[in-house]
Image: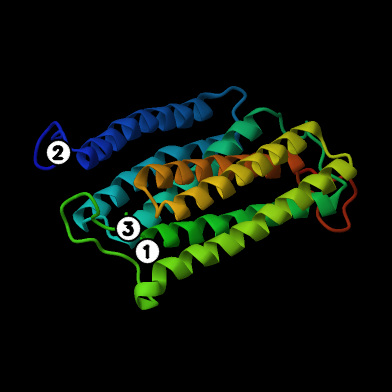
Amino acid sequence: KCYGKVAPPLETHAVIEYGNRILSGFVGLAAVAAGVLAFRRRPFRRDLARIGMLLPLGVLGQAVLGGFTVRNHLAPGFVMGHFALSMLILIAAATLVWRARYEPGERQRSTDRLSVWAVRGLLGLGAVTIFVGTAATAAGPHAGGAGTGDEIDRLEWKGAETLDWAIHQHSRIATVLGLAAVGVWLLLRRRGAGPEARRAMTGACVLLAAQAAVGAIQYQLELPAEIVWIHVALAACLWLSLLWAAAAAGSVPPPNVAIGEEAVPAA
């Protein structure tokens, strides 16, 4: 139920919340289908089956966490955890899509350790940037019960200056991420990385540029909700592009093992 009713009242926040539940239902169906099909695949692959099961389990976890989030009147910590779990589910989804494209051993491990670890490091920095961004949002005007009629519950650790401080820390880390992304893009191009990895990194750089523009606009306009929504949506797209870049960059063989000698699937 939404606000005690089967259908939501005609209020913006209620419609958004109800729409989220409806869309989550379709996501749940897709996740269950992916998990079942991964198990029914022939020839059977244990790695795909394990990853496939993470999707419905993740959606189930989201349903439980979403219930606690509503019961706690959209407390910022729960909202941050809700978004973070979404990012973790996307890791499983992207991994399943990537590994399903190749048979075990079909794709050779990379000999370019520098490029592989550079992309992986960028993925880690991206995770930190997104997490700090959720903290900045949780300290802002749309945190907690904003729009629900409840008193707004915000993260606050520096008094009235918390929001401005959090935004500037997020901006600094995002700037480092942007410069690092351009550097990794140049590195992949110079070292002749595969076209898929370069395309993914190009997409990440474009999304980071768009994020910088959106972030500057929303800061100047004092964080209108519509632009914050765009900022968060772009963050999810950026996360997917970084995941795809990391997958396309490949993996490296264990130390002291030559390419082609290991029995572990390369994909």
Vertical order, 88 against 20 (above or below):
below
Q: What x and y, as percent, mark residue 133?
A: 48, 57
Asked if the residues shown at circle 3 and circle 1 are in contact, with their CB atoms under 8 angstroms apart, the answer is no
Q: Find the residue positioned furthest to the bottom.
A: 158
**120 left or right of 151 in image:** right
Tell me the SS state at disc 2.
loop
Vertical order, 43 against 239 (above or below):
above
Q: CA distance from mark 1 to mark 2?
A: 28 Å
Q: CA distance from mark 3 to mark 1?
A: 7 Å
**209 left or right of 25 in image:** right
Q: Say how many tags the image has.
A: 3
The residue to which callout 3 is attached is 141
Vertical order, 170 against 206 (above or below):
below
Q: What x and y, as percent, mark residue 153?
A: 26, 64
**181 left or right of 259 in image:** left
Q: Residue at x 47, y 67 (%)?
A: 166
Q: Residues within 10 Å of mark 2 (few under 14, many from 20)?
A: few
Q: Residue at x 9, y 41 (%)?
A: 4
| Residue 247 in view (yes/no) | no
Please state, as top left, top right, bottom left or bottom right, where the C terminus lies in the image.
top right
Mark 2 vs mark 3, foreground winner is: 3
Mark 3 vs mark 1, foreground winner is: 3
Asked if the residues shown at circle 1 and circle 2 are in contact, with their CB atoms under 8 angstroms apart, the answer is no
Q: Earlier along the polypeptide chain: callout 2 or callout 3?
A: 2
Amino acid bearing label 3: Pro
Q: Quadrant of residue 59?
A: top left
Q: Residues within 10 Å of mark 1 (few under 14, many from 20)?
A: many
The residue to which callout 2 is attached is 1
Tell me the SS state at disc 3.
loop
The residue to which callout 1 is attached is 139
